[in-house]
Amino acid sequence: MNKPSNRSAADADLAAGADEDTQQREVLTVIVPCLNEEDNVATTAQTIFEVAPELPIDVEIHFIDDGSTDHTRAVMEQIRDEHPERCSIQINPTNMGLGRSVLKAYELLDGSRWATVLPGDNELIFRSIENFLEIRDRYDVILGYLKNPVIRPMTRRIASESFTHVANFLYGFNFEYFNGMKLYRVSAFKGIDVVSNGHAFNPELLAKAVLRNPDLRIGEAPFATKGRKHGHTKAFQPTSILEAVWDVYRGFRSVTSYRDDVIKSADQD
């Protein structure tokens, strides 16, 4: 029997190493929630596809059609059909709201992968995710803060800063922002339920995640936005602000109850 050459052995080692690298390759799922964004969702997806090859991580898109009444779903399906290995779609027959839609998505994803939420209005600059990926080895959750706030109207900046101050006060946090771009392990939030929605969803979820895991490593990184080219934001209408205030109250009460359950559970251990 002929003895294998050194070259063959080396090739085998390289192949084994390549297989191992493939198995260990990290994955980022970009969750794209949409409500009547037929004019923006295709551009949002294109932005992700353009940036993805430059990132040190594999990228997939998980679309959410949150009860749209326009052609948002049809546009998503077309993108999915063109990129079947990189895209998936979650259909909500009726509007569930941003928070519940994203929570539902977590149950469909592997807890070990990274995730970020990029609304389908194409307002956030996806390339900002590079700032988050650079420090991902040090954190489980990375919150984003806006580095070009001047691009937003003064009324929106005032409302946003007021909300951040209230949320920090209620939960004892000291973060710069809650509702912008983020990067996190799905496992950090998977299995946690929330009662609030919209803007109040994020601080409630984060508070419960910290109660569940006090060792959760949380960092911050900058992101940029370019504003909407089509349509208007749904976040800062008068009715939306009133709903946000109510949701903050509901979320705080839920966190209080969750904290009591955590304390009781610890006493029983």
Image: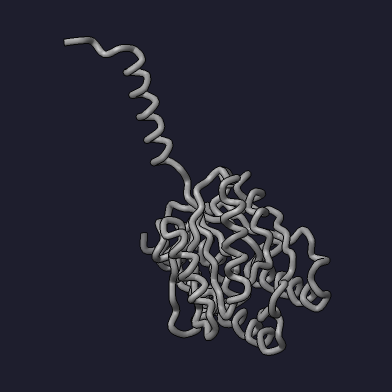
Q: Residue furthest top?
A: 2
Q: Quadrant of residue 126?
A: bottom right
Spot occupied by residue 255 in the image (x, y as percentages of width and height):
53, 73
148 lies left or right of 78:
right
Q: Is residue 123 above or below residue 185?
A: below
Spot occupied by residue 213 in the image (x, y as percentages of width and height):
49, 57
Q: Is residue 251 above or below residue 125?
A: below
Q: Quadrant of the C terminus?
A: bottom left
Q: Which residue is drawn at the image coordinates 52% and 72% (left, top)?
A: 75
Spot occupied by residue 197 in the image (x, y as percentages of width and height):
56, 78
Q: Which residue is drawn at the image coordinates 56% and 66% (left, top)?
A: 207
Q: Quadrant of the N terminus?
A: top left
Q: Which residue is drawn at the image coordinates 36% and 15% (left, top)?
A: 7
Q: Report the front residue among 235 and 3.
A: 3
Spot occupied by residue 21 in the image (x, y as percentages of width and height):
43, 36
Q: Which residue is drawn at the image coordinates 62% and 79% (left, top)?
A: 248
Q: Report the front residue among 105 and 190.
A: 105
Q: Is residue 237 above or below residue 224?
A: below
48 lies left or right of 175:
left
Q: Does the rendering let one see residue 100?
A: no
Q: Does the rendering let one see residue 209?
A: yes
Q: Report the front residue among 218 and 170.
A: 218
224 lies left or right of 85:
right
